[in-house]
Amino acid sequence: MKNWFMLTLVGQDQKGIVAQVTAALYQAGCNLGEASMLRLGGNFSMMLMVNTQAESAALEQLLQPITQTLGLHLHLDTIEGQLHQHQEADVRISVHGADRSGIVAQVTEALAAAGLNIVDLASDVAGSEGEPIYIMQIEGVATQGIDALQAALEPLKQAQEDEDIQVHIAQIETLMM
Amino acid sequence: MSILDILKYPDPRLKNPSEPVTAFDEPLQTLIADLEETMRAGPGGVGIAAPQVGECVRVVMVDVSSKPKIKHHGCLILVNPEITAWDGYAVAREGCMSVPDYTGNVIRAVNISLKAQNAVGDTQEYDMEGYEARAVQHEMDHLDGLLFLDRLVSRRHDLFRRKTYQKKAQ
Ligand SMILES: [Zn+2]
């Protein structure tokens, strides 16, 4: 099929979003590629690769009854549907500590400068309202090696010791069998 | 010796349970030699099972000696292997030559004791740990028609969350 779209959908979490959206796409003859869907702070978010003969406007029209009824925001981007070319993460960085502004920026800036390509990042705010904690897990490809990442994080670790921010970095060893 | 074609999922033959080996004959020796060559031809391959090349017999090979700083037994040929004891468990990432372009997290026992015959039919016993134990468990799954896809655990939230959960459970 000729067109690949990245379908982005956001709205208040409620029952049946995934089922209704994917059923409509299936009935219209669309194929699905890779997807990431999750609940973030009471909202449901979807990023979904859709392969179809249809143009963007037709796809939007197809989903309009669902998005309207459920109060969802839909966005479509034309993309190149690259499949079968996964980048294998070889390093995992986990960060946790008392929630404060700037953690993500400081950590990811240091890592980017030391050659990290992020494949997957997930973060949560946990703890309680009075004492929130921040937890982030990053998986990526260390293009300049894990030692470079380790070195880049060292000053951050030192500076943040009094703030009790923990940064751990570990190799992801994949056994091929 | 020759490099054999690896069956790729969803080939239904990967779902078949394999038969025990009864004859330690010339064809078995040829299969073992071909398995080794095929395993070494794959990038970074540390194990192979006979059903992956379409031979439904209980033969696996594991060699994790290329991994630095770990305990191992070198290149192991395991015929009719049986795990006799398990201890501990850990999550780690696995890939499979029969499942291209995908890797996933799988829980395996950390330490295992194993009984298996070698290429000429002598029974051997092994205690193994870590990567080697994981590779053997992955390959032995192939003998029962199982893939690591049947045992996937979440890619996200694997370590930190799991520790928290364990504390709660105690
Ligand atoms: Zn395998």
Image (cartoon, coloured by chain):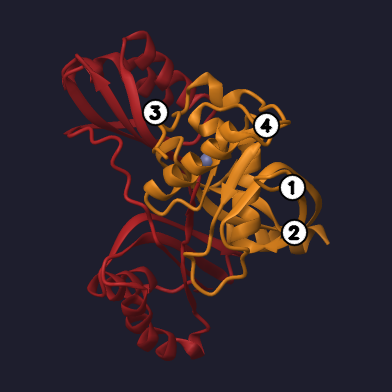
Secondary structure beneath dot 3 equals loop
Tell whether A48 sits left or right of B55.
left
Nearer the viewer's eye, disc 1 or disc 3? 1
**Sequence order check: which comes first, mark 2 or mark 1?**
1
Q: Position of residue B108 (x, y in %)?
A: 67, 52
Q: Please provide percent x and percent y for residue A15.
A: 55, 27
Residue assigned mark 4: B144
**What x and y, as percent, mark residue A53?**
19, 14
Q: Chain of mark 4?
A: B
Q: Residues within 10 Å of mark 2 (few under 14, many from 20)?
A: few
Q: CB atoms at circles 4 and 1 under 8 Å apart?
A: no
Give whichever of discs 4 and 2 has the lower sequence position. Answer: 2
Camera-near label (2 vs 3) is 2
| Residue of label 1 | B116
Report helix, strand or loop for mark 4.
Answer: loop
In this orientation, which residue lies closer to the viewer: B158 or B73? B73
Mark 3 vs mark 4, foreground winner is 4
Q: Amino acid at mark 2?
A: Tyr
What hue represents chain B? Answer: orange
Q: Which residue is mark 3?
A: A71
From the image, state the color of chain A.
red
Q: Chain of mark 3?
A: A
Asked which quadrant contains residue A156, the reply is bottom left
Q: Please state which amino acid type lies under the numbered disc 4.
A: Asp
Asked if labels 1 and 2 touch by Cβ distance under 8 angstroms, the answer is: yes
Residue at image point 36% right, 23% down: A67
The residue positioned 40% from the left and 31% from the top of the image is B5
Q: Amino acid at mark 1?
A: Ala
Secondary structure beneath disc 2? strand
